[in-house]
């Protein structure tokens, strides 16, 4: 459970840094995402989930 809380905390730190350091770039990224078709966005999301699961599996197998 502590690992889940740690992971969520790290996500919040990274997201917060992006918003704090480059708030105007967020608007550009959102505009870019609006132009990408829904099916492609869904595939990008599924790819991100697969990479995340792989990273977690790798970390756990290395003993983290």
Image (spheres, grey):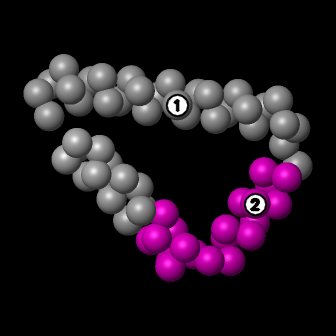
Q: Secondary structure at mark 2?
A: helix
Residue at image location 68% in from the left, 77% down from the top: 24
Residue 12 location in percent, x, y?
A: 41, 62
Q: Quadrant of residue 27?
A: bottom right
Q: Secondary structure at mark 1?
A: helix
What secondary structure do most residues of the magenta stretch adopt?
A: helix
Q: Which residue is mark 1?
A: 49
How many tags in the picture? 2
The CA distance from mark 1 to mark 2 is 20 Å
Residue 30 marker: 2
In the displayed structure, does residue 9 sit left or right of residue 60?
right
Residue at image location 85% in from the left, 52% down from the top: 34
Counting other residues with Cα less than 10 Å from the Cα at mark 1, is it few (<14), some (14-19), or many (20 or more)? few
Q: Quadrant of residue 32?
A: bottom right
Residue 36 location in percent, x, y?
A: 84, 43
In the displayed structure, does residue 13 sit left or right of residue 5?
right
Residue 14 location in percent, x, y?
A: 42, 62
Residue at image location 35% in from the left, 30% down from the top: 55
Q: What segment is highlighted magenta in the picture?
A: 15-34
Residue at image location 75% in from the left, 37% down from the top: 41
Q: Please identify the quadrant where the C terminus is shown.
A: top left
């Amino acid at each position: 459970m502590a690992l889940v809380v740690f992971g969520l905390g790290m996500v919040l730190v990274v997201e917060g840094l992006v918003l704090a350091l480059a708030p105007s770039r967020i608007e550009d990224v959102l505009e870019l995402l609006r132009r990408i078709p829904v099916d492609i966005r869904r595939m990008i999301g599924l790819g991100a989930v697969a990479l995340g699961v792989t990273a977690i599996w790798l970390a756990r197998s290395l003993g983290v």
